[in-house]
Amino acid sequence: MKHVQLGRILYMKLLRWGFVCFVLSIVFSTGVFADIRPPNTAETQVIATSTSVHCMGTFSESDSLVWQQSNEVLGKNIDFDLNMPIYVGEGQGDWKYNENTKEWEHVEPGQGDYILPYPDYPLFEEVPVDEPEPPLAENEVQMTVSTRETTLADQGETDYMKRSTIDTNWKTGNMYNVDQEKMVGFSGSQTGRIISEESAAVDTVGMTMTTLEGEVWQCPLCGHTGHCLPPFCNVVEMGSSLDMKEVQFTTDIKSRSIAEIAVDQEPDIRITLPVVDGPPTELNYRIGVTGTSPDAPALGSVEAYVRAHAKEGSNQCATPCGGEGLDLVYNEKTRASGAVKVFQKDMHYTSGFRRAV
């Protein structure tokens, strides 16, 4: 009975702050389907920044990342066509077949019956041919990772700290390709406001992939998937926005989108298939909002959201025209406005053959 009375007293005290919002963590993970991430390129890059600002007046921050990567080529498919003579009619070409020598001969135009479809390449040479995407080539996977932040604080006191690291090398299960954290405090004047928007997305797509047994699998327990992996198309976006007069808030973005290359051991041998059962694709987003002191709430409005759409082909590894085996859509948005004592939202997405959730 004492506990019930104490709870009622605490509840009435919290109501004095106006609108009080508690949002517990949310986990969104996927186990039916699985992303296959492209492997790292031979050359990798790291971009790291650290920002610390204390400002009276106006402060602004804007940054964005758009990162695309494929295990083949972005935007086109490279195929090979054999430069074989094509019959065009008697006396219409510049190549002829010599029945006596059993060889092809290049002659003056009008003296042959054949032409080469690619005259700038040698006879019977394999000629690379570019074809536009989509669709992707077989065994091709692509990913797009993006982040964006826009923050503007005006007529107030601002404390802003942010750390950002982007690493294009492959990562183990406890490491990330994109890692961004920030902490912001703002106390505005009578007309002072801080407006901040942030988002992060992971978009992965892939065609039917052969397993290349013994090369792309690291875990021997995963061999039950058969001789191929179905095509997939998965996109997840998370983010938040706020418009506040008094606030202290933190955000955290972590994503993993690059796999280890399967074959890169012998000299001059680099097969760009990824290790498919390594650490999964992952996107984490967290936001926490409180007042500028333990006794004061944040004043204004804040929201956070997650949107996801996942598709996968059938388990028989059919082409995309063979039919879908999965179509999953998930949307969620949480919003609070007024005197916000606590606002916290944690969102987590994983997709892979070997998940740890």
Image (cartoon, helix red, strand yellow):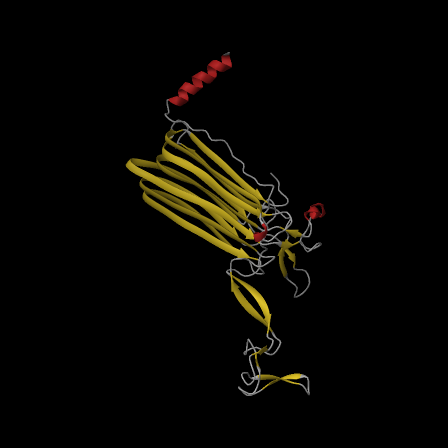
Q: Residue at x 58, y 66 (%)?
A: 79
Q: Position of residue 46 (x, y in %)?
A: 52, 55
Q: Position of residue 310 (x, y in %)?
A: 53, 45
**254 to 268, vertically: above or below:** above
Q: Is residue 175 in sight in this rendering?
A: no
Outermost residue toward the left in this view: 190
* Total numbered circles: 0
Residue 172 as seen in the image, left or right of residue 291: right
Outermost residue toward the front in this view: 90
Q: Position of residue 193 (x, y in %)?
A: 32, 38
For this rendering, which residue is in front, 117 or 209? 117
Q: Is residue 78 in sight in this rendering?
A: yes
For this rendering, which residue is in front, 304 or 210? 210
Instruction: Look at the image and tell me in which quarter the C terminus lies.
Output: top right
Q: Residue at x 59, y 53 (%)?
A: 319
Q: Residue at x 58, y 41 (%)?
A: 30
**101 to 25, vertically: above or below:** below
Q: Position of residue 81 (x, y in %)?
A: 59, 70
**140 to 14, vertically: above or below:** below
Residue 225 as seen in the image, left or right of residue 130: right
